[in-house]
Amino acid sequence: SEKNVQVQQQVIDVINHIASTASKFPKKCVVLCLLGISERVADIKTRAYAMRCLTNFSEAVGPGFIFERLYKIMKEHKNPKVLSEGILWMVSAVDDFGVSHLKIKDLIDFCKDT
């Protein structure tokens, strides 16, 4: 809920650093951060930080877990930018991680619904 963009960027950087360097990053931490990070993807000033954070989350807990959580967040969010930028991140995540970590049926259902 912080309004200062530089503070938002630094907060995302701290979360990013912890996710990428911690020997174990629990899924509970990802769940707590995911809604806020997915909202930051919609803002041009914090987009790169948030997308990098989503990628680090995927490396820490697996892209399948992140995708499952993002489906629900993006469907219910009122800001269409969250949906469009979230889908762009998903495309890059599929390029980075492949589809072997994903439930393809859920991904196709999500695409059909949106």
Image: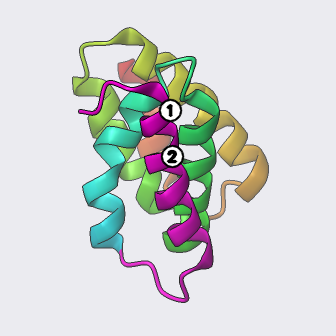
Let me know if residue 14 appears in the view.
yes
Residue 21 relative to residue 9: left or right:
right
Give the magenta-colored segment's residue range.
1-26
Q: Is residue 27 magenta?
A: no
Name the one closer to the observer, 100 or 57.
57
16 lies above or below 42 = below
Q: Look at 43% across and 21% down and name the residue there.
A: 83
Within 10 Å of the Cα at label 1, are there few (<14), some (14-19), or many (20+) other Cα atoms? few
Query: Where residue 92 appears, x then y in whole percent?
Result: 71, 39
* Disc 1 to disc 2: CB gap under 8 Å: yes
Query: Where residue 77 appears, x then y in whole percent?
Result: 25, 22
Q: Magenta segment, principal secondary structure?
A: helix
Identify the residue position indicated by label 2 in the image: 10
Dot 1 falls on a residue whose secondary structure is: helix
Check the picture and name the quadrant holding the N terminus: top left
60 lies above or below 23 = above
Within 10 Å of the Cα at label 2, are there few (<14), some (14-19), or many (20+) other Cα atoms? few
Question: Which amino acid type is shown beneath numbered disc 1?
Answer: Gln
Q: Look at 32% across and 12% down and name the residue there.
A: 79
Q: Look at 29% across and 59% down and name the residue there.
A: 31
Identify the residue position indicated by label 1 in the image: 6
Q: Look at 61% across and 70% down and name the residue there.
A: 20
Looking at the image, how many numbered discs can be counted on the residues? 2
Query: Where residue 25 appears, x then y in whole percent?
Result: 44, 78
Residue 113 relative to residue 96: left or right:
left
